Amino acid sequence: MNFECVIFDFNGTLFLDDDKHIAAWNEISREIRGTDITKDELQNQLNGTPNQKNIEFLSGGTYPQRQIDFYSQKKEKLYREFCKKDTKNFHLVDGAEEYFDYLKSQNIPFTIATASIWENVEFFIDNFHLDRWIPRENFVYDDGTYENKVAMFKDACRILGSSPKQCLVFEDSGSGIQNAFACGIPNIIAMASDKDFSIYKGKPGIKKIIRSFREMLPE
């Protein structure tokens, strides 16, 4: 793979938090429509998609902006509470810090593009000290202006001074992978962590599937 810059998804890629998102979205889904989310909805609709789109989906497009904003904030507050309670698993995935250090040593620019809102991004920066590697102003997040992650990836490439064709992306969700490919990014690595590799079969652009960032370090 030839690339000039690297973009990381965060949730499920650098930090394994599916259970926290599921718990938070289930509470919101029960409140909005009286039922839990399904596995298919989580993987192909909710993961890697801005909260506004998710609330619109759960409400059937019936909520005004004030209700969308209310439930978006409520979901993320619940999520942060679940993260802090699980102290054993509140850390970056295996090999992530070492891979960040390696990219720094090679002068390869990188950033994080996430569908999380700023309150969550700031929460991650402060708790994982991400600004050791990435300036705060270089994070791309759900600020309410992005239609989808295609636009986020394009903005991240601009910030890194490169183009999608020269980019490497790490993603874990089906929607995130599809958006990276739609953006024109030819090099996509799926972070499977503890997921079944089969869910990534047939996804466009995937060059490799990994369970640890140590697999990306030179031998």
Image: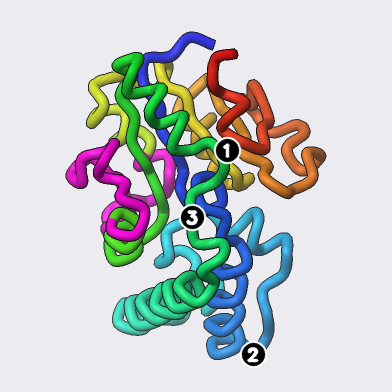
Residue 131 colored magenta? yes
SS state under label 3? loop
Colouring mode (rainbow / by chain / secondary structure / one colour): rainbow
Q: Residues within 10 Å of mark 3 (few under 14, many from 20)?
A: some
Residue range corresponding to the magenta coloring: 126-152
Query: First in sequence: mark 1 or mark 2?
Result: 2
Residue 68 colored magenta? no
Q: Residues within 10 Å of mark 1 (few under 14, many from 20)?
A: many
Q: Residue at x 57, y 84 (%)?
A: 27
Q: CA distance from mark 1 to mark 2?
A: 30 Å
* Label drawn at residue 91: 3
Q: Is residue 200 above or below residue 148?
A: above
> For mark 2, what is the residue?
34
* Label drawn at residue 177: 1
Q: Residue at x 64, y 26 (%)?
A: 206
Q: Quadrant of residue 202?
A: top right
Q: Is residue 156 above or below residue 172?
A: above
Q: Nearer the viewer, mark 3 or mark 1?
A: 3
